């Protein structure tokens, strides 16, 4: 079941090689989130990152890429609202697992290739009981994507390999893949934290999704959750006072207890 907005036909997603530019960069994201000033544009922040050496000994080119091609798209959209929320999340024991999970969410929202690789490569492999993934698995996915029109231009073998390596690197940093063995990485039975479920559900709600749209939203697929699993998780978390869930057949009603995302992250960080 999908929300009305999600039900409309969508254009074929177009992949880029931007995923090559970095990985999850969790430590860099933490440093930048702490240093960023509300209202500061990506370019203003980039210049200050250079002046103040916020990324340490990073070269100017790498700092530019991290700020403008990774940090800004993930966190400075919506007038910097994600950055403000994530700074509060960082106040909870340096963010912990919740920080990593939500960084994964924002990274996948900004890079459709990454999102689809997680949904179409990682989760099916885990469901099938496969013990490891390699860059070859991601490369095969890219070949299929090219045939389906998701990659508009022809990528060289080198570019495909770099993109595949970038995807594997990101999945490893976010905790979906583990130790490398013989060119392959162990698949980890990854599941989102309860705080992640709380954050995402409220984010979708305050973003305008209906109650049914919240539980059916495609973002849950990033975390391997289908609609029934989302309802079950939210029902379980009702006992913690986040909301009250009533579900009967296709009808879902949620009584929300918080009035803003800032209230939610304050409670999560408390």
Image: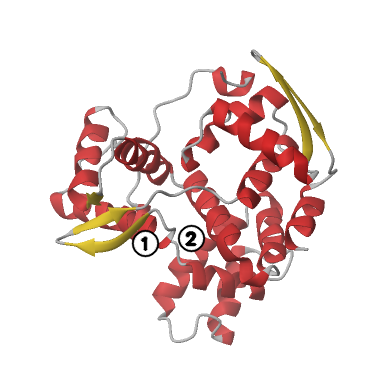
**Would you call the spot at circle 1 few (<14 residues within 10 Å), some (14-19), or many (20 or more)?**
some
Check the image and report above or below for 256 versus 97.
Answer: above
As rendered, which of 5 and 198 lies closer to the eye? 198
Element type at mark 1: helix
Q: Please state, as top left, top right, bottom left or bottom right, where the C terminus lies in the image.
A: bottom right
As rendered, which of 194 and 113 lies closer to the eye? 194
Q: Give the side of residue 112 with respect to residue 213, left or right.
A: left
Residue 85 is situated, as x and y percent measured from the top left of the image, at: 71, 58
Taking the spot 19% from the left edge, 54% from the top edge, the residue there is 161
Q: Give the side of residue 224 with respect to residue 163, left or right.
A: right
- Residue 150 visible from this viewpoint: yes
Taking the spot 37% from the left edge, 39% from the top edge, the residue there is 123
Residue 200 is situated, as x and y percent measured from the top left of the image, at: 64, 43
Q: Which residue is mark 1?
A: 21
**Would you call the spot at circle 2 few (<14 residues within 10 Å), some (14-19), or many (20 or more)?**
many
Q: Please state, as top left, top right, bottom left or bottom right, where the N terminus lies in the image.
A: top right
Check the image and report above or below for 224 versus 245.
Answer: below
Check the image and report above or below for 254 versus 264.
Answer: above
- Measure how far apart labels 1 and 2 are at the Cα level: 8 Å
Query: CB of mark 1 within 8 Å of CB of mark 2?
Result: yes
- Residue 73 visible from this viewpoint: no
Instruction: State which tag comes first along the sequence, 1 or 2.
Output: 1
Element type at mark 2: helix
Q: Give the side of residue 256 with respect to residue 51, left or right.
A: right
Query: Which quarter of the picture shows residue 171?
Result: bottom left
As rendered, which of 229 and 162 lies closer to the eye? 229
Taking the spot 52% from the left edge, 32% from the top edge, the residue there is 218
Q: Which mark is residue 70?
A: 2
Q: How many marks?
A: 2
């Amino acid at each position: 079941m999908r929300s009305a907005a999600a039900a409309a036909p969508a254009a074929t997603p177009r992949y880029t090689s931007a995923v090559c530019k970095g990985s999850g960069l969790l430590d860099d994201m933490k440093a930048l989130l702490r240093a960023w000033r509300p209202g500061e544009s990506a370019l203003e922040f980039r210049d200050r990152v250079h002046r103040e050496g916020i990324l340490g000994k990073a070269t100017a080119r790498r700092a530019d890429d991290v700020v403008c091609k990774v940090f800004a798209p993930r966190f400075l959209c919506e007038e910097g609202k994600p950055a403000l929320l994530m700074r509060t999340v960082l106040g909870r024991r340096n963010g912990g697992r919740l920080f990593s999970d939500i960084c994964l969410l924002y990274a996948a929202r900004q890079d459709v290739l990454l999102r689809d690789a997680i949904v179409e490569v990682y989760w099916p492999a885990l469901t099938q009981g496969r013990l490891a993934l390699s860059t070859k698995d991601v490369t095969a996915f890219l070949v299929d994507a090219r045939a389906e029109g998701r990659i508009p231009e022809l990528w060289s073998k080198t570019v495909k390999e770099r993109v595949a390596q970038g995807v594997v690197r990101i999945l490893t940093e976010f905790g979906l893949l583990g130790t490398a063995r013989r060119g392959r990485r162990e698949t980890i039975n990854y599941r989102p934290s309860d705080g992640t479920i709380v954050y995402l559900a409220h984010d979708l709600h305050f973003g305008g999704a209906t109650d049914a749209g919240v539980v059916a939203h495609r973002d849950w697929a990033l975390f391997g959750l289908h609609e029934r699993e989302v309802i079950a998780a939210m029902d379980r978390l009702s006992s913690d006072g986040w909301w009250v869930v009533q579900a009967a057949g296709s009808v879902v009603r949620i009584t929300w207890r918080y009035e803003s995302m800032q209230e939610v992250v304050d409670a999560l960080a408390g």
